[in-house]
Image (tube, rainbow, N blue to C red):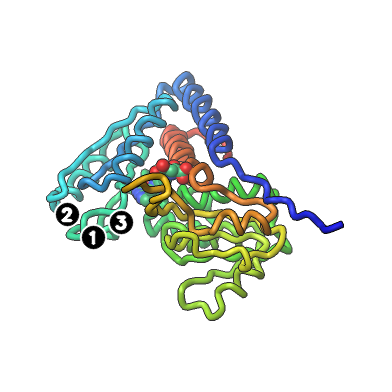
Amino acid sequence: MTAQMQDAAVIDGRSVADSVVETVKQAAEELKQQTGVIPGIAVVIVGEDPASKVYVASKGKKAKECGFHSVQHTLADSTSEADLLALVEELNDDPQIHGILVQLPLPGHIDDGRVIQAINPQKDVDGFHVINAGKLTTGEVETAFVPCTPAGSTLLIERVRGKDLSGLNAVVVGRSNIVGKPMASLLLAANATVTVAHSRTPDLPAACRNADILVAAVGRPEMIKGDWVKPGATIIDVGINRIAAPERGEGKTRLVGDVAYGECAKVAGAITPVPGGVGPMTIAMLMANTLVSAYRHAGRTPPNF
Ligand SMILES: Nc1nc2c(c(=O)[nH]1)N[C@@H](CN(C=O)c1ccc(C(=O)N[C@@H](CCC(=O)O)C(=O)O)cc1)CN2
């Protein structure tokens, strides 16, 4: 009799995201009843990037579903950096707004870093400001905001592996400030032994094969192959890549992650799909961060996620 390999368990990001949003809704209602404070979020989009428009619309819809005060500022592609900075200042001073998010990417003539650093760190619900990044790396998470995608990925890992990752090797492929670096900090905080791999890592497949937890955040469609995966590993695929799908008809496209899903699912123990894995968690954690900000501004202790 030949041994039969079973496909990995699918980690359902949509259902975990729904449970986060449910907690946010209830806690927002409690805050309103107890203090009169309604969590407020401002989302700023500059330009016409089609994917950004979809994400921003989803954020506004989810914020309303959570009972938040939600405003969207839609600025033309030609908006100057000075005008965008002036809007950020206005939002910093607006007492009804507890969370400010400037959708990325910004048009090329605007310096992302300058805009992010202009956001009041106490309203930086994206967690991208250097103050929040510094707090995360030094372990001061009680007063920080953790970037939404790594925070959501961590909740998905907890569902499979628990909160304490002692004795496990985690490999993060990708070293961006938005995902790779904060993800590595969160895995370290959970006691994993962490390697950050990237395009210049010698023998990347061998580095990945060492991972009990493999986080792919490189933005390269289906780069991680089945024979890069340790049997039983937990795979978190952060990539969202739109590729041509001529099999669906002329001009059609489909979404894939950074992981070659079919072949990796045959080896892994658990894996996030794309779509339906990390993506929905990003928006749910944005709601959670905004709620936390409103609680802090009201001098109350927020719920844990
Ligand atoms: N200021 C920010 N900009 C960007 C962030 C961010 O966290 N803050 N992250 C990404 C985009 N993003 C949120 O903004 C985001 C991406 C994808 C999803 C999502 O739910 N994806 C779905 C698929 C959606 C589709 O069909 O296109 C999924 O994976 O199931 C949510 C949020 C860059 N910019």
Point out the image quarter for the C terminus: top right
Horizontal and vertical percent position of residue 65 = 42, 25
From the viewer's perspective, tell me whether residue 190 is left or right of residue 93. Answer: right
Tag 1 or tag 3, which sits nearer the N-term?
1
For marks 2 and 1, give the CA distance.
7 Å
Q: Is residue 77 left or right of residue 171?
A: left
User: On the picture, is 250 further left or further right than 232?
Assistant: left
Q: Nearer the viewer, mark 3 or mark 1?
A: 1
Pick whichever, 122 or 230, lies toward us: 230
- C-alpha gap between disc 3 and disc 2: 13 Å
Mark 2 neighbour density, 10 Å: few (under 14) some (14–19) many (20 or more): some
Q: Residue at x 57, y 32 (%)?
A: 19
Q: Amino acid at mark 1?
A: Asp
| Numbered disc 3: secondary structure | helix
In the image: residue 62, left or right of residue 165? left
For marks 3 and 2, the one nearer the N-term is 2
Residue 111 has which mark? 1
Pick whichever, 79 or 304, lies toward us. 79
User: Pointer 2 and pointer 1: residues touching (CB < 8 Å)?
Assistant: yes
Mark 1 lies within 8 Å of ligand 1 (Cβ measured): no
Write the residue at 42% across / 34% down: 294
To which residue does mark 2 refer?
81
Residue 233 appears at what percent x and percent y? 68, 59
Q: Quadrant of the N terminus?
A: bottom right
Q: Residue drawn at (46%, 73%), measured in percent from left and top?
A: 199
Residue 44 appears at what percent x and percent y?
A: 26, 42
- Earlier-in-chain disc, 2 versus 1: 2
Camera-near label (3 vs 2) is 2
| Image quadrant where residue 169 sits | bottom right
Instruction: Tell me the kind of residue under disc 3.
Output: Gln
